[in-house]
Amino acid sequence: MRIGIVCYPTYGGSGVVATELGLALAAKGHQIHFITYKRPVRLTHYQENVFFHEVNTEEYPF
């Protein structure tokens, strides 16, 4: 299965859980695409079936 995961790439909470979930699914043979504004902190080395797509974010005025 091809799965896209959109997450925060920072330490803590949901970003870590999303990355670990994606890595576990990739180890089972699924193709995982992380879509975020920088590489997730837990995505430190090459793993088969894991892809990273960097997107630009908009700056909103206060």
Image (cartoon, grey):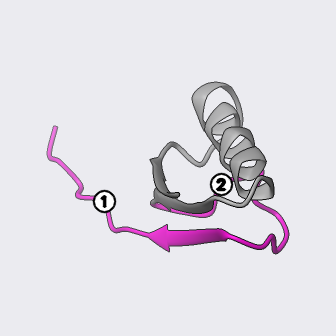
Closer to the chain start, of discs 1 and 2, is 2
Q: Which residue is mark 1?
A: 57
When asked about the image quadrant of residue 20, the answer is: top right
Q: Is residue 14 shown above or below 42?
A: above
Q: Residue at x 70, y 36 (%)?
A: 16
Q: CA distance from mark 1 to mark 2?
A: 15 Å
When asked about the image quadrant of residue 49, the answer is: bottom right
Which residues are drawn in magenta? 37-62
19 horizontally vs 45: left or right: left
Q: Residues within 10 Å of mark 2 (few under 14, many from 20)?
A: many
Q: Residue at x 33, y 68 (%)?
A: 56
Given contact means CB atoms under 8 Å apart, are the residues at marks 1 and 2 in contact? no
Count of numbered tags: 2
Where residue 23 appears, as percent x and y from the top left, is 74, 51
49 horizontally vs 60: left or right: right
Question: Which element type, helix, strand or loop, lies under badge 2?
Answer: loop
The amino acid marked with disc number 2 is Pro
Where residue 48 appears, as percent x and y from the top left, is 77, 73
Where residue 19 appears, as percent x and y from the top left, is 67, 45
**Which image quarter is the C terminus in?**
top left
Residue at far left of view: 61
Q: Residue at x 49, y 43 (%)?
A: 7
Q: Is residue 8 shown above or below 50?
A: above
Q: In this rendered view, identify the residue nearer to me: 37 or 45.
A: 45
Q: Is residue 39 shown above or below 12?
A: below
Residue at far right of view: 45
Q: Residue at x 65, y 54 (%)?
A: 40
Q: Which residue is mark 2?
A: 40
In reply to whether residue 45 is colored magenta, the answer given is yes
